[in-house]
Image: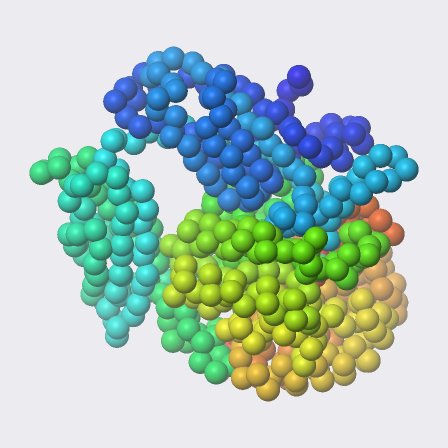
Amino acid sequence: ASQMAVPASFNDLATDRETREFFGDIWYQTVVRVPRGWAGQRIGVHLESATHRGTVFVNDTEVITHQGGYLPFEADITDLVAPGEEFRLTVRVNNVLSFQTIPPGVIEDSPHGPKLRYWHDFFNYAGIHRDVWLTARPESHLTDVTVITDIDGTTGRVTYSTEAVGALVTDVVVRDAAGLTVATATGAEGTLDIPDAHFWAPGDGYLYDAEFRMLDGETVVHSYHQSVGVRTVTIDGTKLLVNGQPVYLTGFGMHEDHVTVGKQHIDSMMIRDFECLRWIGANSFRTSHYPYSERVMDYADAQGILVIDETPAVGLNMGLGGGIMGAQGYTTYSPDTINDVTQEVHAQVIRDLIARDKNHPSVIIWSIANEPESETEGAEDYFRPLFDVARQADVSRPVGFVNVMLAPHGACRVSQFADLIMLNRYYGWYVFNDDLVGAEAAFASELEGWSTEGKPIIITEYGADTYPGLHQLPGQPWSEEYQIDYLEAQHRVFDNCDAVVGEQMWNFADFATTAGIMRVGGNKKGAFTRDRQPKSSAHLLRRRWTSTTSPWNRKNG
Ligand code: GCB
């Protein structure tokens, strides 16, 4: 046994290849003492995530297994532990991907032994990336709270529902940011009106505190504080509206990715990321390509950042990157590959994501997949029910998926189910490389096609690999100059297309990937380096996104 940090990805802590590329079971073990003061309470163990599968043991008893690497799970361990006493906590993490996991992967033989391959362009960091908690609750307690907000003139309306163990009276007290009570209600579900409400809006992360309480007579048995941002998200034709006002998204697809620690969540790193977002004038990001730490979602709420919240369904596309990043020669949707079992796992991760993030005002769109194969009949059958799953779980937000270049307008058979169009396009990089004139014309013409759908279009990725410090005049691919020329060409295309309501450049920062001839020490499309310093292009984005002629102002008056 060796020492391992929690939270952290294990991969980059060691110096040997075997550890970095290890796949299989990784055993974590520690000794924990239950606080003596917790006598008489229900005690639980809560993991914010275990990538990609976690099985938890208390002493020698298995208490829970959870599939899916980026969402929380919890087991009640009251009967197995004693207040004041220690117990042995063991977590078996497994990072193997298969055709029945989300994201998918496959183990293939190579001359040097089996290798885990996958079709997504980020390194398969694994381990326990987020905090692990012991929890204590009274016998009667709230298990879930849902809030949906609406606006009626200057009144904020909060419709709530609760779930609980134990038949006690539930009530709710809403306080404003100064701590003054602004609304109250009694009952497990109901509606609260906040007169003259301060609405949550982009750049104004105003949050109320709703305290949900379970009462036994006058005694508060359990209480749960839920922050509430009062806002609406709607679509009107090709407009995306927040609080009835058109918005234009600026920002990035991001990654949870840092030197040494991999996908570990660290508050200080998060604050640096948000400060860089603020500096550059980004009002939004996408949680490409998996749910991020809950701390990130809370912080986005408080900062008034708009979030496209994505499931880990990335790489459901065996035709993409074949031979370069993933394995070659598979059919995406088939009984032996992405099949009914995968579809159910995918449905479950959509439900789990929405269950976790439904109350975040920052979340304005659900993205149920990134760049799946979407131009085939198999794709249409696979995805049709998944949109229903998302809409059943949440009626209050638009649902979409991110379309890949291989399924352009006219060929894509999945966008018909989406409330809006989200496109990843690399005109001037993967196609028309070093030909920005051709790139601009081809991109503009494809967007003309998508505009006829009458739905808002968000460009969720556009970018060019750029090696920081490489300068060339005239700009050529990989140089800082080319990244600037590339972005200027893309921006002209967006500005000329009315239906485009957002641009999220790929990527916020450079990040780790699997090794190969397409990647130089990882993916280098960042506006920032991996240590969060600006490349030249960051200054261009900042000028565009903070000036009075920003696309926001130009398109929305
Ligand atoms: C994409 C993917 C993203 C990749 C990016 C690239 O379309 O969604 O995960 O990193 O392209 O740089 O190739």
Furthest residue in direction left, as rendered: 217
What's the residue at 83%, 73% (across, down)? 432
Residue 283, given in percent of the width and then of the height, sits at 52, 63
In the image, taking residue 193 as reference, residue 514 lies left or right, namely right
In the image, taking residue 316 as reference, residue 501 lies left or right, namely left
Please identify the quarter of the rendering in which residue 143 is found: top left
Q: Is residue 526 above or below residue 136?
A: below
What's the residue at 31%, 57% (across, down)? 147
What's the residue at 26%, 39% (across, down)? 165
Picture quadrant of ligand 1: bottom right
Q: Is residue 437 above or below residue 355?
A: below
Please identify the quarter of the rendering in which residue 450 is found: bottom right
Furthest residue in direction top, as rendered: 85
Residue 543 in sight in this render: no
Furthest residue in direction right, as rendered: 111
In the image, taking residue 257 as reference, residue 351 lies left or right, namely left
Residue 463, given in percent of the width and then of the height, sits at 72, 64
Q: Nearer the viewer, residue 73 or 386?
A: 386
In the image, taking residue 94 as reference, residue 432 lies left or right, namely right
Q: Nearer the viewer, residue 264 or 269?
A: 264
Residue 104, given in percent of the width and then of the height, sits at 67, 50
Q: Nearer the viewer, residue 206 or 220?
A: 220
What's the residue at 66%, 17% (across, down)? 1
Q: Is residue 60 above or below residue 221?
A: above
Residue 332 in sight in this render: yes
